[in-house]
Amino acid sequence: MITLERRANVTHWTSLRSIGIALIITMLVSVLVLFIMSDQPAQAIWQMLTFPWQGRRMEVQLGLVLQQTAYLATIAIGLSVGFRANVWNIGAEGQFALGSIGAYTGYLLLGSPETLWALPAILAAGMIGGCLWALIPAALRVTCNTNELLTSLMLVYIGGHLLTYLCIGPWKGDPKAGQAETYPLPDSLRPATLISGTELHAGLFILLVAFIILAAILLFTLLGYRLRVAQHTPRAERFAGFSPNNTVWMSFAISGAMAGLAGAVYMTAETGKLIQAENYLENFGFAAIVIAFLGRLNPIGILLAAFMISYVNVGASYIQAALRVDDSVADLIEVAALFSFLGTATLDQYQLKFTRTLRKSRGPEVLS
C-alpha cells in the first residue's frame, strides 16, 4: 500500500531542487514532442529556442513575448488570490471579455471622447466590468453554496456569446468588415506604441504597475497573511476572526478586476475595438490558470512562468510558419510543464510511504 506522508521539514533548497527537476522533465518532454511532430526535430528545437534572433527583428519577437507575458501575469496573479484561499475562479476568460465590454461601454458613456484624458476612466470601467462578472459565481457560492468551478466556467461561454451579440447587434460597426466588430476607438485615445513596428505599448506599463501593487499586497500585508492562513489551515481562518464568505467575495472581486483590466488594455491598445469572440479571445484566461500553478501562487514565480509560457507560445507560432510544425506543440509543452511542476510540488510537501499489512490483527508494517 502506498500513502503520502507530510514532510516534517521543507526547506527552500528542497523547493529549488523540485523546480529544477520539473524544468528538466519539461525540457525532455518538449524535445520528445518535437521529435515526434517534426520532420526536422533538431532544427525545430533550435529555432524555438532562438527564434527572437531569426527572421524578423529581435525587438519585434521579444515584443510579442513581453506582450503576452504582461496579460498572462496580470490575470494569473489575480487568480492566485483566490487559489491561495481555496476559492476556485476558473472563469477569467469571461471576465477578460467583460472587461473589454466594460471598457467600450465606458467609452460610449463618456460620449466617445477623442482625448487621452478619458483613458483612465475607460480602463476603470473595464475593471468594474470584470469585477461584476466575477461576483456572480461569488454570490452563488455564498448564498446557494454552488460550486464556483462550474458557475465561473459556464459564465465564460455566456460572456463570449454576449461579446459576439454586441458586435453583430446594437454595437455593430462597419457592415463591410469581414467579421462582426464595433466601430474603432480614435487613435488619439489609444496607448502609444513605445517602439515602432513592435507590440510594445504603454498599456503594458499599466499592467506591470497593477501586478506590482497586488504582489506587494500579497507578500507584505495582512491580507496576504490572511490568504496564507486560509490556504494552509482553513479552520484556523475562523479562529483568527476571518470570515470565509468575505474571503470568497474578495477573491472573486480582485481576480475579476485584474482580468477586466487586462481585457480593457487589450481592447484599447491591441484591437482598438470589440470583435466577435472567436476572433477576439486569445485564451489568456485559461492559460493564466496554468501559470498561477506553475508559479506556485508566488508573484515572482508567476512572472517567470508567464514569461516561459509566452516564449514557448511565440516560438511555436514561429516554427509553425518557418517549418510547418503544428503550433499545438505549445499546448503540449504547457501541459507537460503543469504536470511536472504540480508533481514535484506535491513530492516537495509529502513523501511516499510503502506499507504492507501482514495480518488483520496486526497493524501495517512500514517497509521504507
Image (cartoon, rainbow, N blue to C red):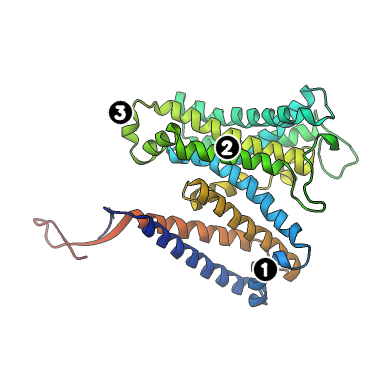
Q: Tell which of 106 and 163 is nearer to you.
A: 106
Residue occupying the point 46% across, 60% down: 340
- Three-letter amino acid code at the position of disc 1: Thr
Helix, strand, or loop for circle 3?
helix
Q: Tell which of 269 and 244 is nearer to you.
A: 269
- Three-letter amino acid code at the position of disc 3: Phe
Q: Is residue 366 above or below residue 192?
A: below
Q: Are marks 1 and 2 in contact (CB under 8 Å)?
A: no
Q: Earlier in the sequence, mark 3 or mark 1?
A: 1
Q: Which mark is residue 50?
A: 1
Relative to 289, 200 lies left or right? right
Q: Is residue 101 above or below residue 289?
A: above
Residue occupying the point 54% across, 50% down: 291
**The N terminus is located in which quarter?**
bottom left
Is disc 1 surrounded by few (<14), some (14 to 19) or many (20+) residues within 10 Å? few
Comparing labels 1 and 2, the label whose residue is closer to the camera: 1
Q: In the rendering, at what x and y percent does residue 27 appear?
A: 53, 68
Q: Is residue 6 above or below residue 93?
A: below
Q: Which residue is mark 3?
A: 239
Whole-number angstrom distance, CA of label 3 to CA of label 1:
53 Å
Q: Quadrant of residue 125?
A: top right
Residue occupying the point 75% across, 65% down: 321
Q: Which mark is residue 283?
A: none
Residue occupying the point 67% across, 29% down: 124
Comparing labels 3 and 2, the label whose residue is closer to the camera: 3
Is disc 3 surrounded by few (<14), some (14 to 19) or many (20+) residues within 10 Å? few
- Three-letter amino acid code at the position of disc 2: Met
Q: Which mark is residue 154?
A: 2
Q: Quadrant of residue 7?
A: bottom left
